[in-house]
Image (tube, rainbow, N blue to C red):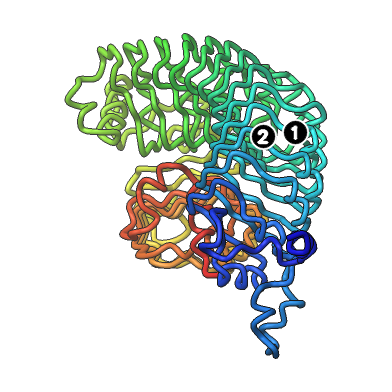
Amino acid sequence: MSRQLRTSRFDPRAGFHAEGKDSRPSVPQGLLKAARSSGQLNLAGRNLGEVPQCVWRINVDIPEEANQNLSFSSTERWWEQTDLTKLIISSNKLQSLSDDLRLLPALTVLDIHDNQLTSLPSAIRELDNLQKLNVSHNKLKMLPEEIISLKNLKALHLQHNELTCLPEGFEQLSSLEDLDLSSNRLAAVPAGFALLSSLLRLNLSSNQLKSLPAEISRMKRLKHLDCDSNLLETVPPDVGSMESLELLYLRRNKLRVLPEFPSSRQLKELHLGENQIEMLGAEHLQHLQAILVLDLRGNKLRSIPEEMCLLQSLERLDLSNNDISSLPCSLGNLHLKFLALEGNPLRTIRREIIAKGTQEVLKYLRSKIKDDDGTSQNDSVPETAMTLPSESRVNVHAIVTLKLLDYSDKQATLIPDDIFDATKSNIITSVNFSKNQLCEIPKRNNFLSSLPEEMSSLTKLQTINLSFNRFTVLPPVLYHIPTLEAVLISNNQVGFVDPQKMKLMEKLSTLDLQNNDLLQIPPELGNCVQLRTLLLDGNPFRVPRAAILMKGTAAVLEYLRDRIPA
């Protein structure tokens, strides 16, 4: 008996247990063999109560099949196995992990979400190569201090746990780009967070935060900040100086006032719904030149400032469930795709107009502008000795303040020269010639099906709007404009996108492909991680399904990446 014990103790294959010999969990030998070749092992959803020893020792022990093969082909030489780099043990019943985790030092991805873990082993510090750690949907009350040793960690998902604090020195995770701490019990954010200088995405939603440290503004690369569903009463003014910020979520808090955003010129989505905001002033809007989505629903707003009409990029505006009794007619000049007004005591717009949808409301507001001015659509504003004829037909205020030349909705077949003369010496960065009948150069509601190759010389072009045209593919020249940050090509006939070429557009953060003819979305599009806003609604493809699309761009890209053939 003692000899048998000694043999078991020193046998390098001791970690392997044949199915049926004992009650301990086992792993099919075929899976292990494939993992030694690919470096990846997926044990998700196998009802495991513990991780089998053969998993921890997969790169240590001699495989069982070695006893069964007296000769080996080049594909079966187990001594040339690949170190395990990706281990997925999600959706099981694990309550703890063994310190034998240290036997897998080559791991770059460890996914153990959706288990019953209450702690992590201190041996996690030895996973020097780990880049992505997903421990979400567990029962963690604290993190081991050893976690700060993971210097190569880029993504850390800790959402849906029971964390009340973070270990001292957490800011030493200097490579971290994606941190999700949502749905925990955090009451404060350490000021040291400012040292997470590589962070691009930070999710703090559904915690118990009453304030944010002013130091958070030092995260100069941060693009996505989610603080939904907390107890915030104020936001540090310094948040408005975060130059890279693109998405800011502050819904379901206790905010009464807003910060100004003097430096957040990249901000594309600002979500402020379900707070207690009573006033919105020009100072809150004047710098939001790139804003696409503004959510103000469920607040206590009584009025909307005229300056709202300066947000020429705005596509979605939610003002529902406030105390607004009237709207500025100039709102009708915005090119909104969605405007929500329900739940307001509006006196100036009849309910039946609101019920007809966004475009009817905007049309009505524009008609009120004409009524108030006593002019018709083709009339110009009365000229004075100081007003050029061209200036009476364009928004000079927009030219000076927003650097925008707007000659839209004129049904024109060409743009008169004097319209360009109205710009005088002002610098123009945006041009809007939409809703005309032009055959060349303009942006949308026209009949364009191609773009000239000469456009590749537009070396400073950042945004192009090709919506409402007749494109069947993304114009090839766009792939050769490296400065492009936003491509808006909704409501066309696009049936194909090239993910390989699109991946080379390193600055592209917004891609609007809504209402086209896409029968399928190539999984490789998921590798375009530079995208922060990807809009795909209104296409005939079957997958991703609507439930995935509703989760947002990050979820869609992750879904697509998971479908890339191995």
Can residue 388 be seen? yes
- From the viewer's perspective, is 116 left or right of 61? left
Q: Quadrant of the C terminus?
A: bottom right
| Label pair 2/1, CB-CB below 8 angstroms | yes
Q: Extreme left residue here?
A: 352
Circle 2 Cα neighbour tier, 10 Å, few/some/many (<14 / 14–19 / ≥20): some
Q: CA distance from mark 2 to mark 1?
A: 8 Å
In this view, 341 is above or below 76: above
In which quarter of the view is residue 80 placed? bottom right
Vertical position of residue 100 compared to residue 244: above or below:
below
Front residue of 170/88: it is 88
- How many marks can you see? 2
Label 2 sits on residue: 119
Instruction: Name the one closer to the observer, 425 or 265.
Output: 265
Residue type, mark 2 in image:
Ser
Question: In the rendering, which numbered label is found on residue 144?
Answer: 1
